[in-house]
Amino acid sequence: MLKVNQALTDSFINAGFFDKKRIAHENLNFTPPKDEMYAEIMVIENDVTPKDLNSIDESDGIFRVILRSPAGGGAVAVRTMSDRITAFYRIGKTIEYDTQRVVIRKFSAAPGESRDGWYVFIITIYYRAYARR
């Protein structure tokens, strides 16, 4: 399951949406930049099950991207970034890492909300992953 996480994490970093200092990762210290949009990313995986009896396992889950922008600055910049991210993770896109293959199934976005001085906008990208045993 680590390879699924790496596939999605690396693809986000390499896509260049944000420089590395503006991406918060799971269980790493992070200081939010002042007055700049940044992203929190995480992979939430479901169980791994056999796709067939011979050699392929399958799992699914979500890749969550939480965009945070200073509150009071409007939603256009955040929604523009959301559009860039969802265009990159288009339905049917395949991402590969080592021997791991991840296929994007769908995506959604929750309504934005102000929270602790930030405008928070959550993108959920649904995937299915296949791996050889």
Image (cartoon, rainbow, N blue to C red):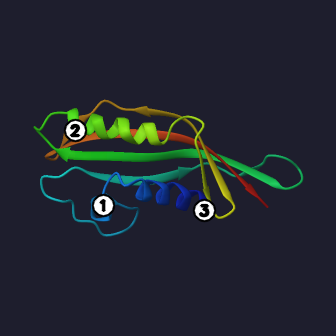
> Residue sitting at 72 percent across and 48 percent down?
58
Q: Residue furthest left?
A: 72
Disc with the residue nearer the chain's start (3 vs 2): 3
Task: Please report the residue visible at 26 percent of the width from the left and 41 percent of the height from the top.
Answer: 120
Quick check: 61 left or right of 110? right
Mark 3 belongs to which amino acid? Lys
Quadrant where the N terminus is found in the figure: bottom right
Disc 1 residue type (three-letter): Asp
- Label 1 sits on residue: 19
Task: Pinpoint residue 123: horizontal percent, then vertical percent.
Answer: 39, 39
Q: Work out whether residue 15 or residue 40 is closer to the camera in this orientation and state it.
A: 15
The Cα atoms of the two marked residues, 1 and 3, are separated by: 22 Å
Secondary-structure class at tag 2 = helix
Residue extending farthest to the right is 54
Distance from label 1 to label 2 (Cα)? 16 Å
Whether 127 is drawn above or below 12: the answer is: above
Q: Nearer the viewer, mark 1 or mark 3?
A: 1
Question: Can you name the residue that lies furthest to the bottom here?
Answer: 29
**For this view, does 71 lie left or right of residue 127?**
left
Q: In the drawing, what numbered circle is on residue 77?
A: 2
Mark 3 or mark 2, whichever is nearer to me: 2
Name the residue carrying label 3: 3
- Alpha carbon separation for disc pair 3 and 2: 31 Å
Tag on residue 122? none
Q: In the rendering, at what x and y percent does residue 113 appear? A: 23, 35
Question: Dot 3 lies on which element?
Answer: helix
